[in-house]
Image: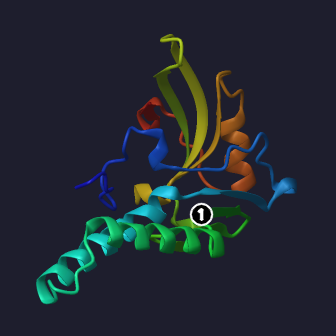
């Protein structure tokens, strides 16, 4: 419901559901690979503020209608409060993925839901090929190929590499570097769209 992923279910076909390393080279001599991303989270900031505004305004109008200042005045107070909070503590999110010879570590912190896990490489099924067919901004079909480290739980599957050029021997190189199986049979291919 609401775009959630069923753990240990079928893997989704949408690229944004997966963690992405996007490393050009995954080899034993280049481990550990660390990826750090960050950005602004305006929606994560506005949602609790709007909810708080609606709840307090409704509660104030029910319990003390004589003291209720009105929607406009109440809204003005909340806008000023929101600007103060935004200036003192900007709503940011960050994501950290580390891939080493022992496992995968994932951390994500945002305004709404922090997430942290570590999975040993022995819990992964292996390295599988990825094929993504999507349309670009000009309406043309684009095919990308890549490699993913597949876990039975789709939320822990990590895309290691994705490129318009077919990966030559990248599947075997990644499997050797991480000491996991290379599942090159087409039935294991992770097919993605969008």
Residue 146 sits in quarter: top right
Q: Residues within 10 Å of mark 1 (few under 14, many from 20)?
A: some
In the displayed structure, 25 sits above or below 8; it is above
Residue 2 position, x and y percent, is: 26, 54
Quarter of the figure with the N terminus: bottom left
Residue lying at 68% horizontally and 40% vertically, measured from the top left: 172
At mark 1, the secondary structure is strand
* Colour pattern of the rendering: rainbow
Residue lying at 26% horizontally and 70% vertically, measured from the top left: 54
Quarter of the figure with the C terminus: top left
Residue 81 position, x and y percent, is: 49, 74
Residue 94 sits in quarter: bottom right
Closer-to-camera residue (152/56):
56
Left-right relation of 7 to 59: right
Left-right relation of 15 to 56: right
In the displayed structure, 3 sits above or below 34; it is above
Closer-to-camera residue (60/51):
60
Residue lying at 48% horizontally and 40% vertically, measured from the top left: 15
In the rendered picture of this protein, how many numbered marks are placed on residues? 1
Residue 117 position, x and y percent, is: 54, 73
Q: Residue furthest right?
A: 29
Q: Does any portion of residue 179 appear in the rendered image?
A: no
Read off the residue under disc 1.
93
In the displayed structure, 8 sits above or below 107; it is above
Closer-to-camera residue (4/176):
4
């Amino acid at each position: 419901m609401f775009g959630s992923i069923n753990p240990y279910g079928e893997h989704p076909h949408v690229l944004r559901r997966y963690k992405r390393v996007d490393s050009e080279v995954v080899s034993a001599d280049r481990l550990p690979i660390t990826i750090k991303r960050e950005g602004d989270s305006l929606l994560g900031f506005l949602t609790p503020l709007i909810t708080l505004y609606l709840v307090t305004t409704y509660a104030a109008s029910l319990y003390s209608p004589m003291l209720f200042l009105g929607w406009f005045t109440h809204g003005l107070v909340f806008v000023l409060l929101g600007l103060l909070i935004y200036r003192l503590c900007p709503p940011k999110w960050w994501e950290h993925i580390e891939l080493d010879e022992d496992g995968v570590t994932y951390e994500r912190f945002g305004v709404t839901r922090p997430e942290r896990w570590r999975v040993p490489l022995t819990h992964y099924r292996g390295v599988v090929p990825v094929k993504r067919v999507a349309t670009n901004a000009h309406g043309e079909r684009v095919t990308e190929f890549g490699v993913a480290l597949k876990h039975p739980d789709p939320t822990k599957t990590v895309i290691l590499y994705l490129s318009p050029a077919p990966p030559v021997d990248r599947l075997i190189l990644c499997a050797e570097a991480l000491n996991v199986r290379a599942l090159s049979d087409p039935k294991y291919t992770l097919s993605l769209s969008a």
